Image: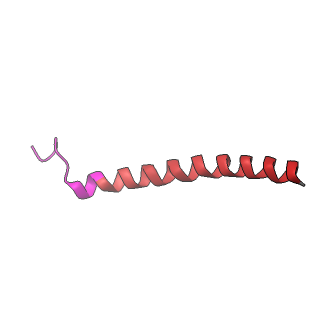
Amino acid sequence: MNHKTPPPSVYQAPLVQDAGNVTAVTLGPNTFDSSDESEYKDS
Protein backbone atom coordinates (compact mmCIF):
# COMPACT_ATOMS: atom_id res chain seq x y z
CA MET A 1 0.00 0.00 0.00
CA ASN A 2 2.89 2.33 0.80
CA HIS A 3 4.33 1.71 -2.65
CA LYS A 4 1.08 2.67 -4.40
CA THR A 5 0.59 5.79 -2.28
CA PRO A 6 3.91 7.64 -1.81
CA PRO A 7 4.21 10.09 1.10
CA PRO A 8 3.63 13.83 0.56
CA SER A 9 7.34 14.48 0.99
CA VAL A 10 8.27 12.27 -1.97
CA TYR A 11 5.37 13.63 -3.99
CA GLN A 12 6.27 17.25 -3.31
CA ALA A 13 9.94 16.74 -4.18
CA PRO A 14 9.37 15.81 -7.87
CA LEU A 15 6.42 18.19 -8.18
CA VAL A 16 8.38 21.17 -6.89
CA GLN A 17 11.41 20.32 -9.02
CA ASP A 18 9.26 19.84 -12.11
CA ALA A 19 7.35 23.08 -11.53
CA GLY A 20 10.57 25.00 -10.89
CA ASN A 21 12.20 23.64 -14.03
CA VAL A 22 9.14 24.31 -16.17
CA THR A 23 8.74 27.82 -14.78
CA ALA A 24 12.41 28.65 -15.29
CA VAL A 25 12.46 27.26 -18.83
CA THR A 26 9.13 28.87 -19.76
CA LEU A 27 9.96 32.17 -18.10
CA GLY A 28 13.51 32.19 -19.42
CA PRO A 29 12.95 32.11 -23.20
CA ASN A 30 9.55 33.79 -22.97
CA THR A 31 10.76 36.77 -20.97
CA PHE A 32 14.06 36.92 -22.85
CA ASP A 33 12.38 36.78 -26.25
CA SER A 34 9.81 39.43 -25.33
CA SER A 35 12.38 41.68 -23.63
CA ASP A 36 14.89 41.25 -26.43
CA GLU A 37 12.38 42.10 -29.15
CA SER A 38 10.83 44.93 -27.14
CA GLU A 39 14.20 46.42 -26.21
CA TYR A 40 15.53 46.07 -29.73
CA LYS A 41 12.41 47.63 -31.25
CA ASP A 42 12.36 50.37 -28.62
CA SER A 43 16.04 51.10 -29.20
Task: Count all numbered tags in the image, as a single digit.
Answer: 0
Residue drawn 67% across and 47% down? 29
The location of residue 27, given as percent across then percent down, is 60, 51
Q: Residue furthest left?
A: 1
Question: Magenta span covers which residues?
Answer: 1-11
Chief SS of the magenta region: loop
- Residue 32 magenta-highlighted: no
Residue 31 lies, in percent from the top left, at 67, 51
Say which residue appears at 71% left-offset and 51% top-offset.
Answer: 32
Q: Residue reaching furthest bottom?
A: 9
Please give the name of the residue rendered at 39% of the width and 55% of the height, measured from the top-left corner: 16
In the rendered view, would you say 4 is above or below 14? above
Residue at 36%, 50% in the rendered image: 15
| Residue 8: in magenta span | yes
Decide if residue 18 is on the left or right side of residue 38. left
Residue 34 locus on image (x, y percent): 72, 47
Q: Quadrant of residue 10?
A: bottom left
In the foreground, 6 or 24: 24
Asked if residue 1 lies left or right of residue 40, the reply is: left
Q: Position of residue 9 (x, y in %)?
A: 25, 58
Looking at this view, is 41 or 12 the one in front?
41
